[in-house]
Image (cartoon, grey):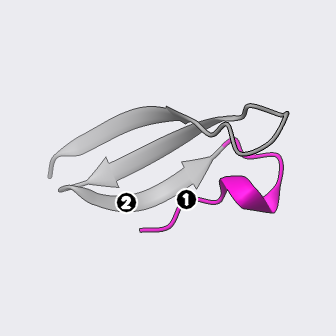
Amino acid sequence: MDFRVRDVSCGKCSNNCEIICVYRNNELIDAWGNRCDRGVVSA
């Protein structure tokens, strides 16, 4: 299996959350770091 981690700066509100995304074989399997519903990452 190939795992990859990527950070994304949301910028959708004043929180400027850094969202950490974890991918397994190029499929998003988990994300965390958002402080509001606007920063939710979809697969």
Question: Residue 27: image x %, image y %?
Answer: 28, 62
Q: In the displayed structure, does residue 19 sit left or right of residue 37?
A: left
Q: Nearer the viewer, residue 1 or 28?
A: 28
Q: In the displayed structure, does residue 27 sit left or right of residue 19?
A: left
Residue drawn at the location 41% of the way across and 68% of the way down: 43
The residue singled out by tag 2 in the image is 28
> In the image, is residue 16 part of the stretch drawn in magenta?
no
- Say which label, 1 or 2, has the lower sequence index: 2
Residue drawn at the location 40% of the way across and 34% of the way down: 6
The residue singled out by tag 1 in the image is 41
Residue drawn at the location 25% of the way across and 44% of the way down: 3
Please rate how many residues cluster around mark 1, counting C-alpha atoms within 10 Å: few if below 14, some from 14 to 19, many from 20.
some
Q: Which amino acid does label 2 sit on?
A: Leu
- Secondary structure state at the residue bearing disc 2: strand
Q: Which amino acid does label 1 sit on?
A: Val
- Secondary structure state at the residue bearing disc 1: loop
Q: Is residue 14 above or below residue 23?
A: above
Residue drawn at the location 73% of the way across and 58% of the way down: 38
For the image shown, how many numbered marks are present on the structure? 2
Q: Give the range drawn in magenta.
A: 33-43
Q: Is residue 31 above or below residue 17?
A: below
Q: Which of 22 and 38 is in front in this view?
A: 38
Which mark lies nearer to you, 1 or 2?
1
